[in-house]
Amino acid sequence: MFDWLIVGAGFAGSVLAERIASQRGESVLLIDRRSHIGGNAYDCYDDAGILIHRYGPHIFHTNGQQIVDYLSQFTAWRPYEHRVLAKVDNKLLPIPINLDTINGLYGLDLNSEQLERFFAERREPVDEIKTSEDVVVSTVGRELYEKFFRGYTRKQWGVDPSELNKSVTSRIPTRTNRDDRYFTDTFQAMPLHGYTRMFERMLNHPKIKIMLQTDFREIRDLVPFNRLIFTGPVDEFFGWQFGKLPYRSLRFEHRTVDQEQFQPVAVVNYPQTEDYTRITEYKHLTGQKAARTSLTYEYPTDTGDPYYPVPRAENEALYKRYEALAAARSDVWFVGRLATYRYYNMDQVVGQALSTFRRIQDALPTAAPRQAMSEAAE
Ligand code: FAD
Ligand code: UDP
């Protein structure tokens, strides 16, 4: 008998497995239907010996010191500030849009003040900013929206930005200075030996057993457990009874090329051309030196593994119905990007898992006697 069954060995499931085992001394069976731990943050060495991310580039950044402190128990860090270029009008230009983007695009020599005016002359007033289109046209105007956002967003999400919640393009700021970092968080770094090694250290505890290539549906009635944490898609858990929640998927094409460097930065976005959204070159993230270099091309699709909840009003309404079912299940904790249908970054999922653990501590304070009982039954 396990005290806990945890479904999903990504950030949500692994943080909770670690906390429960180390702080409550309770036994955990952690399962995943994939053949590895780490969820979407999984990384591995490819045939060329380059550390790649199987599910696309994962850059760690956060303003949460508590989250850094927690993860630092399991990894050292390599400082890394992410920079992205967008191929627009056949030029490689910084995204988020900044002073160099505009000067480079239009052959201008504006300073920050002049750029403020440039945007002010072009932005379109929007009464209430609701959609991902509103966010951009009300900041930089329609032409830049068309060049940098509309095509990328349509490719990435399969819908027009006018049909997506403002939260999606709000992730990307607009700057009038020359800061070309993708993120401005106080902590930006990559796990020194990769994410998978960090997860291995997190889960290396005698109270944690791991079963891979195991779907919850296969074992839910076979393995005895007291409590459940579910980090997979919430609609799947409830048998899609209100219909499917849309999740956007990606097809990843991993390639190695015989050149030392392929592109000047880790990620180049393609908002105007190509079927893929972006190309990632991993050596920029890891600092690895090698004669060859490995890349990932991302092709968005509707079918395949669920990667992104799609932030639209109608999807949020459907999620609310599942959320009500989830809230009524006091024996199950739903955590993570798929189970709570939130477009969360890794640090947000770690934060959510740590706060779920605090809720578990409050709800189930008498860990020791229950643990003794379950051990007796084992
Ligand atoms: P997941 O990592 O999805 O883990 C859930 C696990 O549950 C999966 O391994 C799945 O196989 C398993 N599972 C589901 N259902 C079942 C079942 N029935 N039975 C058994 N197992 C099941 N975040 C950042 O902070 N920075 C980035 O740069 C970044 N880049 C990203 C790039 C891409 C392409 C994607 C898709 C995401 C990116 N993210 C990034 C987000 C990050 O991946 C997530 O925040 C984080 O991995 C979510 O962790 P999770 O545990 O909630 O979910
Ligand atoms: N986006 C865009 N053009 C870009 C970069 C981003 O239109 O060059 C939009 C797009 O809708 C994307 C969203 O901004 O999905 C968020 O971008 P982010 O890089 O945060 O996406 P993620 O890394 O989560 O895929």
Image (tube, grey):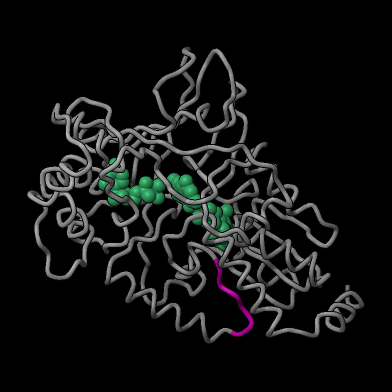
Q: Is residue 372 placed above or below 232 in the rendered structure? A: below
**Residue located at (19% from left, 47% from top):** 150
Question: In x, y percent, where is residue 147?
Answer: 17, 40
Q: Quadrant of the C terminus?
A: bottom right
Figure quadrant of residue 11? bottom right
Question: In x, y percent, where is residue 325?
Answer: 48, 83
Question: Is 276 on the left-hand or right-hand side of 64?
Answer: left
Q: Is residue 156 shown to the viewer in this render?
A: no
**Residue located at (21% from left, 28% from top):** 104
Figure quadrant of residue 52? top right
Residue sitting at the far right: 376
Q: Is residue 197 placed above or below 50 in the rendered structure? A: below
**Residue located at (30% from left, 35% from top):** 94
Q: Is residue 176 shown to the viewer in this render?
A: yes
Q: Is residue 81 placed above or below 187 in the rendered structure? A: above
Q: Is residue 167 placed above or below 71 in the rendered structure? A: below
In magenta segment, residue 233: no
Question: In x, y percent, where is residue 73?
Answer: 73, 52
**Residue located at (79% from left, 65% from top):** 21
Question: Is 178 on the left-hand or right-hand side of 43?
Answer: left
Name the one closer to the observer, 343 or 300. 343
Question: In x, y percent, where is residue 314?
Answer: 27, 72
Query: Residues in magenta?
Result: 330-335
Q: How many marks?
A: 0
Q: Quadrant of the N terminus?
A: bottom right
Question: Is 1 on the left-hand or right-hand side of 101?
Answer: right
